[in-house]
Amino acid sequence: MLVHLQGPWTPLLGRLTLQQIPFHVPILVVTFIVVAILAAMVLAATTYFGKWGYLWREWLTTVDHKKIGVMYILLGLVMLLRGFADALMIRTQQAMAVGPGSPGEMGAVHGYLTPFHLGQIFTAHGLIMVVFAATPLLVGLMNIIVPLQIGARDMAYPYLNALGLWLTTAGAALVMMSLFVGNFAHGGWYGFVPYFELPYSPGVGVDYWMWTFQLSAIGTSLGSINLIATIVKMRAPGMTWMRMPMFTWASLSTNLIALTSFPVLMVALALLGLDRYVGTHFYTAGMGGNLMLYNDLFWVWGHPEVYFLILPAFGIMSEIIPTFSEKTLFGYVTMVIASFAIGGVSWGVWLHHFFTMAAAPSVNSFYSVTTMLVGIPTGVKVFNWVFTMYRGRVRYELPMLWALLALFLLLVGGMTGMMNAFASNDYMWHNGLFVVAHFHMMVLVIAASIFGAVEYWFPKVFGFKLEQKWGKWFFWFMIIGTGWTFVPMFFLGFAGMTRRLDYIPYTQWSPYLHIMLVGMVFYVVAVLFFVAHLYVSLRDRVKNRVGADAWGTGRSLEWMTHSPVPAYNYAFIPHVNVLDEWAWRKENGLTELHPGDYEGIHMPKNTGVPLFLGMLFMGLGFALIWRIWWLALLCVALIVALIIIRSFDRDTDMTIPAHTVEQVESGARDETSVAMPTAGVRGGTVIAHSILQSGTSGISGSTTSTSPSLAPMDR
Amino acid sequence: MSASAAQKVDPAHATLWARHYAGHDMIGTRTFGFWLYMLTDAMVYAALFATLGVLSHVVNLAGGPSSSAFINPVYAYGQTITLFLSVLIYGYSMVALKNGNRGGVIGGMFVAMLLGVVYLVISGIDIGNMFAHGIFPQVSGFLSIFFTIIIYHALHIIVGVVWMLVMMIQVAREGFSANVVYRLINLRLFWHFQAVIWVFVFAFVYLQGIVA
């Protein structure tokens, strides 16, 4: 039944041979050495400080949604750096390889990357940024924040949550492994048929791409089931639909998109897999295959996926802007409707990714119009944010700066998106840099929102604020880098440059390409500032400790529990009375967090099973990529066995006894009171509730304080 | 919206904390999640049926046989009867669950499982016959999706059979604990869903295949 392969194959190792390890590519050898040294240092440090037990107990086996979220975000940041390194290489190559006289290094005719190598880089860049950077970052944020915002103690299925994390991690690990064992696909992150079929791409690159993609798709689908069930079933008493915070609404909409669209991606990839492994004819040229079928199936997922990424970013902006404008969100109901309108329209626009496939004019017109329709709910959102700020008491702290950057980039990206929506325009710049610049503007909206969200919710998770100075340097260099990199890209798009070129024949484009490279230098500096930002924040963490309401003007439930959040989230589940419950309680002086008289809390126990399942899925992916059938069968058997064995485990839950809860609660209070020294941060460490106790009314008027009271909120 | 809502709530008499909160209904939550899972599986089937629609053109036969040339309706009929009977008997098993009758649950599930196995045997014979006549998924784009759909459905039946085996052991060992009950309910959803999907497979793959 299986297809015949080119090249060697042995039953024991499949297609794996020593030749598959790229000793001859200096860039990869150096990368490997650096990665190996870093890994050895991390392992040695963990052993030296005796942290293995801690790592195992507190992180690797955890089912705590906050820790899982943090691990998702760490994974996302690591992969973001990897994707950034790829971008750096692409930009360098394109700046070097202009014109027939341009020099060639390291085996390349022009530039320093061979077309095969560059192809792998831009494929990996796209895939990593979309599914292994943006998705884990956003899923991680939703993981942490949604249960807190709805007053739940955990996700609906904590075990499944951990499984989703480890499946995504397995996929990411396989992408990284493709650097050093074999190669990656080199035809673009969304794939082309029949180019990705076995006769045209006989290597393991496409298999790496396919299985890592598939693993992340499964992980994200499981995560979406979990988040939807959490939002629908786990809300605190009194939290009716119309009292849900906007980020939770956005999460619901976005996960409905994921739930319905990721299965289609699984089908698109699985059918390609059948073609490559079994020799079926879904997408082959000839033999009854259909080439456009792949494009349709892929983009039926692909476009909803775009909104899957942007809606949480909108949700983040909808949380940050009201907090730092000290006003309730303008047009809450329209915001909810707009979120779901975007989610709904997302299903009817996928054909705009290939207007040039020569569908009938009526078909192209239909998708043109639906694409433009997206602008209406998005416009509603933009105006709502602006009106939220209008006559608000706007404070330009770091989260707000990021939210404003996201808002600005959304205008640029959105307007150019409208230009792309015209099929007649798209005929001219299809596959051109104009489109690339447009969607990079949009993903930078997501990136800016994520950085804003990290700044905004960091104190909630870790108990201290990130410092402001280096963070602002990071922020401004990101803006400068964005301008220098992507404004020339729009011009090159107008000039007719197409994407993914390994050699640029027109020397008149050279200045733009060099300006873009300067932009990348700013980005590199920005990354260094980010590292400094994290380092200084960690160093000065005691100085930047905050109480429950870290920004002083928080509005939703997550600011009603301690920072950092205890394992059980809330000692008492809040009863929700209004939208913006915490703001309402502050206005009415109801900030007491109910001390004393604690009860035992029922929580799930830690388990290593999701981690092992993740490892087995990684083994399965590796076996399938290299066609090591015995290993694949073994992994499947072990996966099934492990799932069944786990289902017999009756000891999965525990109860945190009341006296432990009391200890944690009183400990949290003490920490808050001790760690509230003079404000070291520009603008002051703002503690609204402490001001409230001294008699001012509500959230207004509280934020200009530079000398907060030392009295903790819940005493 | 919020301002007006806030005015309606009297802060002096508002309930602020849900004391002695019993938590959320575990079985309901698990069942809801399983519905969501089934929605994803339904989307997989939707994509597969869409693919079947696309690949049903005469071009996609690529000179190979059309389904009217080789489909044996007797097998599909047999599969329909066994699967629906199995679902019916699983339903009786759930009646026994309501009555707290452990033996009834296990017995009903055993029969349902056996019928699932019979379904798989019929399906195996059917596919084996096709293979024997040189009708393989590799022959044409149409046959690729034809076999993919019926084998994907058969894989679900295998999962269901294994799941029933596990549940029979768990009911025998644990009785009707919350964990066992939610799994029984989810398995019922799963098993009924397979019958529903079979209706579509039967209509679009077999019936339409014979007519076309």
Image: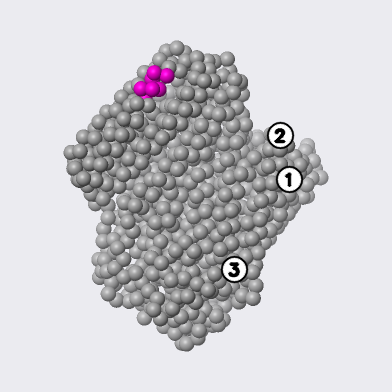
Tags 3 and 2 both on a single chain: yes
Nearer-N-terminus badge (1/2):
2
* Residue plotted at (73% across, 37% down): A361
The quadrant in which residue A523 appears is bottom right
- The disc placed on residue A168 is none
Q: Residue furthest top?
A: B133
Are the residues flagged by discs 3 and 1 in contact, CB closer than 8 Å?
A: no
The amino acid at mark 2 is Ala
The image's mark for residue A422 is: 1
Give the left or right position of residue A634, taking residue A524 as reference.
Answer: left
Q: Position of residue A220 (x, y in %)?
A: 47, 47
Mark 2 falls within which chain? A
Identify the mark nearer the N-term, 3 or 2.
Answer: 3
Residue that appears at 33% across and 27% down: B82
Reply yes or no: does residue B33 show up in magenta.
no
Q: Is residue A600 left or right of residue B131?
A: left
Residue A71 seen from this side: no
* Whether labels 1 and 2 share one chain: yes
**In the figure, A99 relative to A670: above or below?**
above
User: For the residue marked with disc 3, what is the amino acid?
Assistant: Phe
* Residue B77 included in the magenta stretch of the image: yes
Q: Which residues are magenta?
A: B73-79
Residue under mark 1: which chain is it in?
A: A
Q: Nearer the viewer, mark 1 or mark 2?
A: 2
